[in-house]
Image: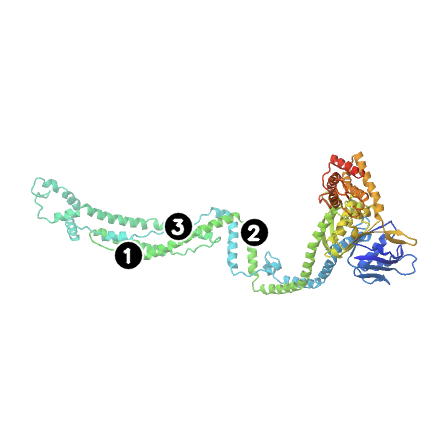
Amino acid sequence: MIEHIQLIRNIGQFDNLNPPAQTALTPLTLIYAENARGKTTLAAVLRSLATNDPQLVLDRHRLGAQHPPHVVFRHAGGAAVFQNGAWSHPLPDIAIFDDAFVSANVCSGTELQTAHRQNLHELILGARGVALSGALQGHVARIEEHNAALRQLAEAIPPGALGPYKVDAFCDLEADAEIDRKIQEADRRLAAARSADAIRQRPGFQAIRLPDFDIDGIDGVLRRTLADLEAAAAERVRNHIGKLGRGGENWVSEGMALIAPASEGGDGEVCPFCAQGLAGSDLIAHYRAYFSQAYEDLKATIRQTGIGVRDAHGGDIPSAFERDVRTAAQAHEFWKDFADMPAIDIDTAAIARQWNAAREAVLEQLRAKAASPLEALALTHETLQSIQDYRARIAEVAALSEHLVGANARLEVVKEQAAADDLSALRTDLAKLNAQKARFEPEVFPRCANYLTEKAAKTATEALRTQARAALDQYRQQIFPAFEAAINDYLRRFGASFRLGEVQSVNNRSGSSASYVVVINQQNVDVTAEAGPSFRNTLSAGDRNTLALAFFFASLEQDPNLANKIVVIDDPMTSLDDHRTLRTREEIMALAARVRQVIVLSHSKPFLCSLWEQADRNASVALRINRAAVGSEITVWDVRNDSISEHDKRHELVRSYLQIANPAREREVAQALRPILESFMRVAYPEQFPPGTLLGPFIGLCDQRVGGPNEILSAADIAELRLLLNYANRFHHDSNPAWQTAAINDAELSDISQRTLLFASRR
C-alpha cells in the first residue's frame, strides 16, 4: 500500500510538493481536484511507478524547471524513489484506470484499431498468458521441415493402394488376420445389393430325401410259412394239378367246394365227380390246406410287398431325386455369390447304381418267395450288403439336405440386407478393406513404415509445441469465457444497454488479438466493420467509458493477486449518466473491500462525497489538490461541508416528488430516503450518531436507553424510525441484493416520503 506522497518535484503542476503528515494515504483514498490542477499528472506518475516506464514522468517535466523530476513515495515495503531518470524499484501491483488505459486497450476517440485489440488480448491474458504465447512460436519452424519430408514420403506410396483413405489414415491401418474373409463378405454383400430384386424372388433350398428299405418287414415276409401246409405236400398238390392241364387248378378249387353237397346224406365224404369215398385219399387233406384263406393271404402279402418295393424305389422316384439334386445345384450356383454355401458333392450315378442294385436284390428274393410261398427264406448277405451300401448314400444325402436347408436362415439375412443396404456405402466399405489389405503388401509396407517413422519424429518435435499450446489454450479457455462473463456482469451492473459477445483470442500474422462483438437488441454488431453499424457509430461516449470501466474491473477479476493490488481510478464517471455514476460508486466500494488500496481521483465533488458517505472512516481519507502560489498542493479535504449540498439536493428531490409525481424518478426518491435520515441523525445527534454510524446500530442504542435519563428517542419515535428504515433499506444494495428491482408503489412511496421529511424536520 502507498502510505504517503512525500515528494513530487518538477512534474506538471507540482513544483515542489511536500504534503504534510496528515495527508497520509489509507486503504481508501479520495482525491478531489479541479481540472488542470494535476490529478491526471498524479495518475501518470503512478502508472510510471507501476510499469517502470520513466518516460511517463520525463514527458511531464515541469515547464521552466531547472532540475529534473524527483518523486518519493513511501509504501509498506519502504520507499519508491524516482531520481536521475529512473525508479529505485517499481511497484507492479498498481492497476490504473485513466485515459491512458482507455486509449491503449479500448479505443482512441471513436476508433477501434488493431493495436487496441492486441493490447486488450494481453490485458485479458496477463503476463503469464503473454509468456505462454511467445513460447509457442519457437516450436513452429522445425515442424515445417517435417511437413516437407512427409509430403515427399507420401508421394512415394502408390496412389492406387490408398483407396478412399488419406495417407495418414492409410498408414495407420492395422493388419487383420481375417481380412480376406471380410473382403469376401463385403464383396458378397455388395453383389447381393446389386441383385436385390432377383434375391428377393429367389427361394431357398428344399429338403432332398432317398427312400429306405424296410429290412425287418421284407425279411419277415420271406421267412413266413403256413403251419398246416408243408412244402412237400404243397409241391405234391401243384404237381397233380399240373397234370390236369390248363384250368386244372380252378377245376380242383371249384370241386373242393362241391364235396359237401355231394356227400350230404352219406356215411362220409365222396368225390363229387365219381361219388366214390374219399376216406382213403391223403391228397384231399392237402387240397384243403392248399386252397385255404391263409395260403391266399400269404401269397397276397408277398405280392404286395414286392409292389411296395417297386413303387417306393422305382418308376418316377429316381427321376424325382435327380430333379431335386439339379434344383439344389442350381440354387447353390445362384446363392454361392452371396453367402457361404455347403458344397453339393454327391455322385448321383453311383447312388443310382447302388440304389438299383439294392432294389433288384430285394425284388429278386421276393420273386423267389412268390414262387415258393411256403418255403422259409431270408435276405441274403449279398442283399443286406447292397442295402447297407445304399443306406450310406441315404445318410450322405440326408446330411447334405440338412446343411442346405440350414442355410436358408442365412439366405433370409442376405435378403433383408440386400433390401436395406446402400450401394455407395458398401462400395466404400469394400474399398476400405481392399486398401487395408494393400497396406501390408510387400511393395507398400516399407514405404508406409518410412512415412510413419518420419511422422513419429514430427510428433516428438511437436511435443514441446503441443505442451506450450495446450498450456496456452487451457489458459485461454479459462480466461476468455470468464472475462466475457465478467465484462457482461459489469456492463449489467453499470446499467449498459449493450453486452459483449464472442470474446475470443484470434491468432494472426502480427501476433494475437482479442475479438468481440457488441450485442444490441440481441443483434451482433461487428465492431471492426468499415460500413454500417460498428464500434464508432453504435456506442455513445458514455457507453465507451462504461465499456472501458467494465474491461478494467473484469481484468482485475482475473488477477490471482487481486488482494494485494493498489487500484488507482482517475475520473471514472466521465460522460456517465446519474445511474451509471451511482453503479460505478457502488462497484468502487465493493472493490475497496477486496484489494489492498483504492485511490480515486476526480473533479466531481458529488461523486467523491457519495463515496465518502459509504466509506469506513477508520480506513479512509479525503484529500484535495488545490492551487498554490506556485503550482498545486495536496491538503486534507473537509468532505462534510461539501456534503451538505448533497443532503439539500435529496430534500429537494423528495419534496418535488411529493408536489408533482414523477414516475421516472421514483427509484431515486426511494434511494434518497435513507441518506436523508442518516444526515439528519448526524446533525441532530452528533454524539450518538458520529460519521460512519449506521442507522441499525443507532436504533439498537436508542432501544437500550428508552425510559432512562439518557433517552435518545421515545419508543414511538423508534418504531417510526425503524419502519422508515425498513422501507428505505429495500432500495440499497448493502441491505437488499435485489434493490434494483424492488417494486415501488406510488402511494406507499408518497406516504413514506412525507413521514421521512416530517421525522427529519420536527426535532
Q: Badges 3 and 1: C-beta atoms under 8 Å apart?
A: no
Residue 522 drawn above or below residue 1: above
Q: CA distance from mark 1 to mark 2?
A: 61 Å
Q: Secondary structure at mark 1?
A: helix
Disc nearer the start of the sequence (3/1): 3
Crowding at mark 3 (Cα within 10 Å: few <14, some 14-19, many 20+): some
Name the disc covering residue 207, or none.
3
**Could you say which quadrant of the image residue 496 lies in?**
top right
Residue position for label 1: 383
Residue position for label 2: 425
Disc nearer the start of the sequence (3/2): 3
Disc nearer the start of the sequence (1/2): 1
**Could you say which quadrant of the image residue 446 lies in?**
bottom right
Query: In the image, what residue type sits under mark 3?
Result: Ala
Q: Residue at point 69% right, 56% down?
A: 475
Q: CA distance from mark 3 to mark 1?
A: 28 Å
Q: Badges 1 and 2: C-beta atoms under 8 Å apart?
A: no
Of tags 1 and 2, which is closer to the observer?
A: 2
